[in-house]
Image: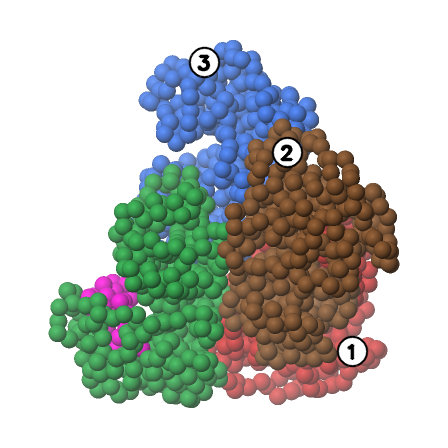
Chain colours: A red, B brown, C blue, D green
Amino acid sequence: MKAAVLHAYDPALTRMSFVQYETVADPRIERPTDVIVRVGGAGVCRTDLHVIEGLWRGKVEIRLPYILGHENAGWVEAIGSGVTSVKVGDPVVCHPLVTSGHCLACRRGDDMRAVDSRFPGLNADGGYAEYLLTGERALVPLPRSLAPKDVAPYTDAGLTAYRAAKKASKHLLPGQRAVVIGAGGLGHIGIQVLAALTPADIIVIDRSDAALALAARYGAQHTVKAGDDAVECVLELTGGAGAEAVIDFVGEGRTVADGLAMTANGGVYYIVGYGGKLELPTIDMVTSEKTIVGNLVGTYAELVELMALADRGRVHLTTREYRLADADLALHDLHGGRVEGRAVLIP
Amino acid sequence: MKAAVLHAYDPALTRMSFVQYETVADPRIERPTDVIVRVGGAGVCRTDLHVIEGLWRGKVEIRLPYILGHENAGWVEAIGSGVTSVKVGDPVVCHPLVTSGHCLACRRGDDMRAVDSRFPGLNADGGYAEYLLTGERALVPLPRSLAPKDVAPYTDAGLTAYRAAKKASKHLLPGQRAVVIGAGGLGHIGIQVLAALTPADIIVIDRSDAALALAARYGAQHTVKAGDDAVECVLELTGGAGAEAVIDFVGEGRTVADGLAMTANGGVYYIVGYGGKLELPTIDMVTSEKTIVGNLVGTYAELVELMALADRGRVHLTTREYRLADADLALHDLHGGRVEGRAVLIP
Amino acid sequence: MKAAVLHAYDPALTRMSFVQYETVADPRIERPTDVIVRVGGAGVCRTDLHVIEGLWRGKVEIRLPYILGHENAGWVEAIGSGVTSVKVGDPVVCHPLVTSGHCLACRRGDDMRAVDSRFPGLNADGGYAEYLLTGERALVPLPRSLAPKDVAPYTDAGLTAYRAAKKASKHLLPGQRAVVIGAGGLGHIGIQVLAALTPADIIVIDRSDAALALAARYGAQHTVKAGDDAVECVLELTGGAGAEAVIDFVGEGRTVADGLAMTANGGVYYIVGYGGKLELPTIDMVTSEKTIVGNLVGTYAELVELMALADRGRVHLTTREYRLADADLALHDLHGGRVEGRAVLIP
Amino acid sequence: MKAAVLHAYDPALTRMSFVQYETVADPRIERPTDVIVRVGGAGVCRTDLHVIEGLWRGKVEIRLPYILGHENAGWVEAIGSGVTSVKVGDPVVCHPLVTSGHCLACRRGDDMRAVDSRFPGLNADGGYAEYLLTGERALVPLPRSLAPKDVAPYTDAGLTAYRAAKKASKHLLPGQRAVVIGAGGLGHIGIQVLAALTPADIIVIDRSDAALALAARYGAQHTVKAGDDAVECVLELTGGAGAEAVIDFVGEGRTVADGLAMTANGGVYYIVGYGGKLELPTIDMVTSEKTIVGNLVGTYAELVELMALADRGRVHLTTREYRLADADLALHDLHGGRVEGRAVLIP
């Protein structure tokens, strides 16, 4: 089959081509639970650039050459002998994590903390290819209203935003406030999920006027230009108290300190984006009784829930399509800031 | 009346006497909800030393001279015109915060975040005295089994430990683990509360062998000597996973980094003690999905719950009694590390 | 002052006049927490008809003659000596229950289960009058966007619907279904609250086509005409599984058995309306693991939350105004089915 | 292999032998996830008698002849080609439900509501045999401290009691009360679980003095002889308010009405036992805001949790052993009330 393959790291991201479009061996069914998916769409994610830079080398076991692509959707092409819940031809969206389902975390529905798992596109061949090897437990059947290429980016970017916003929805009451820091790829999903799941007033902070305009269309009651007075603006909008929930989709630079400063006493600061550092005296946590929550992707059931929202038109995703053969162009466009919404590779 | 009065700060805690035992004006009923309590016991707390050092000057409005003592219990001596829920002579334990009860936080049972409140012993005259001015909403009637002098320290030290352990009890399941860092004044209450409220295995870390021995009697399944290998010990005791809950009653020095390192992915690190600093990259919060929770005293209802545990003999408190006239001695003994358990001033 | 007074029960509701419009003594401030409100709007509720019929005689202590009216809003006219949270002239909406706030239930924010309380309009003089005696703890300050006469019916009808829908919102996920039985006075608020607080698909059942049309405008995805095949329709709409939440605003006749039959295994049936009977073998509860939840009005904090929704235009109330002098006409119109939306008495 | 086989229903339970001890075909591995367990212990349950009576005919698909026994534990004898989480020789306890794990309920950890499942001993051959065909997802590895024959009855009787008590533990606070109706096979486990998981005062009601004595040893603070004044006794023990949680392990005769009458306003009545009828006016549910919760067995994760309690000695089970060849005797002894604790068949 054809695939876009990563052969070498490029720490400065300066090479002409990051990945090579070439012919590789087809994936094969080996375990009874294996499934091969014909890829209908593969999201191009900033994490892919980080992988190319070599940032993930120490964190997961990666062996070059391999195929990138962890946001995948398509049609079932072949199934292992034990597979019963999907059949060849079914349209599916792929949860990024392939688990055996036997550890206690999985049995509690907490797949993301599976003891035993693979993450195609990160520590196994991914979806920048014609076919993807995944597992039965990773597959969410797609409703007819949704095409694989339109939903592929929900599996990681969308799911992460959904999970954080869903956590916040558990405690947000009418009259309370949610701040969203960063209205980009994840943030604009987060805003729509908050609007669908909670009655809270939504305040969105971003550097881009276009992003703020989009945020307002997606349900934000207030928009704030990122900058020196963002904390002050949020405090003013919240009567001096701060917001009961702050979801930080940036997580680097000043957003961490600012995000905590915008959080009301007794409120919750959700970290989704990363790159920065959390730094504060323990006494500040004690006197404020704030809570800080880390967020990572989401469970299989949460992906089903997000698909239900998409199916009902409660969340929308802006995508730009590239041919699989142009994967390298898509990565360079992403790196160069030339992609609005989410780049998706199609066959 | 007689009282132990703070006249001047002593940043290095080097003076012969910290407070003066002297005659002051009796408190008077002014508001319809005011209550005067004849003090039966007043806990001597490390926070009192911090107040004498001047550490709280910037945080709350303190005007010298004033009377220390925020852990109080006794008998109702006089009541305002609007008081209906207690009568003269009733034995009571005093929640440290006096609130009007009209803000939304109070209406939700979340007294600790009252918009309008006083904290006798911190920003108003406290209980190192024969009589204390407090308010109707601060008073918990005492069951017959409990004497004021024996329960006074529950109102702050005990309540703080109770609240943190209660939060942990909401998610701890059989087979899971709770680590208690620091088995001192607060920690030894925390251990007993965990044992009463949760089925979790309790692991206690302390520098003192005596404290660890006490911890084992109070319900700890495992004890670990504080030191370089504490994290390693906890990981070994938890099959490499870490503990689902870590309650840090120290919160300074290495306990913060160690406490987080002992916390399982998806687990919760509770900060109770303070003095140190939280410092970690946001990516660590993201990949681990840990939660960090700040804790501050507890609500009125939680003090009622703690008294219910004490009444049933599920928590015990070791106290050492001093006469009110010897308040200065008690403070010096505390400063000098010569008090086992909790010092309590009695009439 | 002028008031509409109930002098005698009328079990068959056949008298020419149910209440007399006459001059009575003005209410007076007696307790430090008393507040007199100049009534701006008083909702006319079916419960008032039940009181006139004598149905509430055994349930609460009612002494005739007295003034009906438990859904009240207006302006503060006079305050007791201890009142600090409102001042004369403030626009307020009155929570129906006047509590002292000292019992443990109140301290936990659970006002509705106060040990000590009054319910003006039921066991004390109500708001079918120029002035109403209530208490400080019953008063929610009104935002400028809301006039007393427009929000009075929220205090009982609206609050009850809000509380039940809020409970359901705690467990409803995207892709799940909520059934609302009865889209009348309470139900149409319930639909709007579900739409604001949950992502669930809303299915509404009613006998009236007009009510179903209104339900669709307020956010129902599906409407079902009440009748023999209602259960079948809901099962079909839910893939045979039933709905995860069923809120029954009728609670009599076949709705109880039907409501339970429409509830999914593991789901929750909320009873709000009453008059009927719950009758089922315990084995059916066991094999289905269903939950049945009773609902009664709501807390003070919940009324604040509902006002926040109204202030943001997320819930609307249809009212028809009558002069206080025409209270009897309003009651007869209600009894005769001639009131669309909610009748409200204005000065 | 040898097995005790049910050949015909016996509605009146009057036959000399209910089941025949005979030679049958060995079970065989067919699906990749199949597992054959060498039975070490098979609990003899009242449900088995109900099956013999024919009571379950309409509820599940049963085809005679078949082998009874749904409470099983033993050692892995053979595994299917896809099995990875257990290996031959492992000691295991068998969750009664064998699921494929692919439906949304399973993915949320809610196995009991699996769309696709078998229940050996009910709708497939069970464990009154030398070998049992089950599935990988049903197997909980046993800690070394626990022998199969000692834990077999936990899989149904114990698990059901655990799940109900765990639900109650989510809302029971110090000072609150839990009533256990029926201290028999399930109830005595429920009492121990409540004592391990909650700080509530435990009140136990039973007809048998021996059962009440055992209840007191297992952690009950109060015991009440079942009878006409049981409701009155509980109200007296709870200051007239009733208990915040009532777990009814009987669920027939007067216990249903009595159980609801003992439940505090705002409290929860848990139905575990069955046979009786729930009958009350909806107005009583409304004015009391009570909740009624049905309970059925428990999840895989809950069986793991219960094993953790057993492993730590927090719950104990009284068993009486019979040889598999004496299965019929065990069933007759159970029917005749001659089994104290739980009968278990051993090889």
Percent from the top left, x then y, of residue B116? Answer: 71, 40
Residue A13 vs C262, above or below: the answer is below
| Left or right, A307 with reference to C78 | left
Give the labeled residue for mark 3. C20
Q: CA distance from mark 3 to mark 2?
A: 47 Å
- Residue A253 appears anywhere in the view: yes
User: Helix or strand or loop: what does disc 2 sit on?
Assistant: strand
| Left or right, A59 with reference to C208 | right
Frontmost residue, C323 versus C160:
C160
Give the labeled residue for mark 2. B78
| Left or right, A132 with reference to A50 | left
Quarter of the image where the N terminus of chain B is located: top right
Percent from the top left, x then y, of residue C62? Answer: 42, 24
Three-letter residue code for mark 2: Ala
Q: Residue at x 51, y 15 (%)?
A: C3
- The range drawn in magenta is D42-68
Give the chain of mark 1.
A
Residue D235 vs D56, above or below: the answer is above
